[in-house]
Amino acid sequence: MSQEEEFRVVLSYAQMAAILEHQSLSAAEIASNRIFGGLRVVGGIIELAGAGVLCALPEPTMISKMGCVAMGVHASDQLAAGTAQLLSGETTASYAYRSGQAIAAGLGASPATGQVIGLAGEFAVPLSTASLYAAFRVSSFQGGRMRLNYVLTAFPII
């Protein structure tokens, strides 16, 4: 068969999924999903850098180390979801969001409530880590005693 008689159709994953689900998908939707995926990757990198800073902080209570691990896991989740969204052009849910939805569904909640719980789980790690770190800061450490500065935060300590 010669090259003149060939006909090829090249589709992305997002376009193939739209065809199989009998939905339409415009180029603007794919581009905006990829832009948001790229922003999500940048946010994950910034969050990972923040986790590294928390790991490097010298403090005796190990609260920053727990925050470091929690933020590091959440950052890797955001990086994975953002990369998948950037490459595929489809909106991608993170594992934190999907696990929150699955827990809610397992407890008998409606799908709408599951989405709210999944979204709350998505925001719980960064907000609680930031609140715990900002709540108390050691201002001085002399003679075996710590002097703590209380900082009022806008976020509740979870």
Image (tube, rainbow, N blue to C red):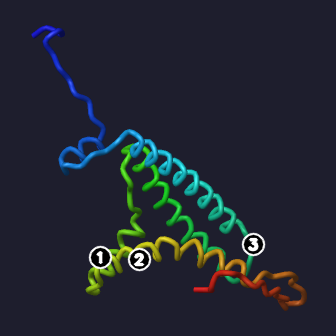
Which amino acid does the dot numbered 2 rest on? Val
Q: Position of 115 compared to 143: left or right?
A: left
**Residue 113's quadrant in the figure?**
bottom left
Residue 22: image x %, image y %? 19, 49
In the image, 144 versus 38, the foreground residue is 38
Q: Is residue 45 above or below residue 62?
A: above
Q: How many residues crowd around disc 3 within 10 Å: few (fewer than 14), some, or many (20 or more)?
A: few
Residue at figure coordinates x 27%, y 46% from the top left: 24
Whole-percent x, y for residue 158 in the image: 57, 86
Question: What crowding class fits label 2: few (fewer than 14 Cα within 10 Å), some (14-19), or many (20 or more)?
Answer: some
- Which label was assigned to residue 152? none
Q: CA distance from mark 1 to mark 2?
A: 9 Å
Give the secondary structure at mark 2.
Answer: helix
Tell me which corner region of the image, top left, top right, bottom left or bottom right, holds residue 148: bottom right
Residue type highlighted by circle 3: Pro
Residue occupied by mark 2: 116
> Which is more N-terminal, label 2 or label 1?
1
The answer for how far apart the CA atoms under marks 1 and 3 are is 43 Å
Q: Amino acid at mark 1?
A: Pro
Instruction: From the viewer's perspective, tell me whether residue 153 is left or right of residue 68.
Output: right
Q: Looking at the image, is mark 3 or mark 2 nearer the viewer?
A: 2
Residue under label 3, please give it. 58
Q: At numbered mark 3, what does the secondary structure look like: helix, strand or loop?
A: loop
Query: Relative to 156, does residue 58 appear above or below in the rendering?
Result: above
* Image mark for residue 111: 1
Comes first in the chain, label 1 or label 3: 3
Residue at (67%, 68%) from the top-left corner?
A: 54
The answer to whether residue 90 is above or below residue 67 is above
Tell me the quarter of the picture where residue 1 sits.
top left
Q: Is residue 37 left or right of residue 56?
A: left
As drawn, the residue found furthest toward the right would be 142
Coordinates of residue 151 in the picture (x, y in percent): 78, 84
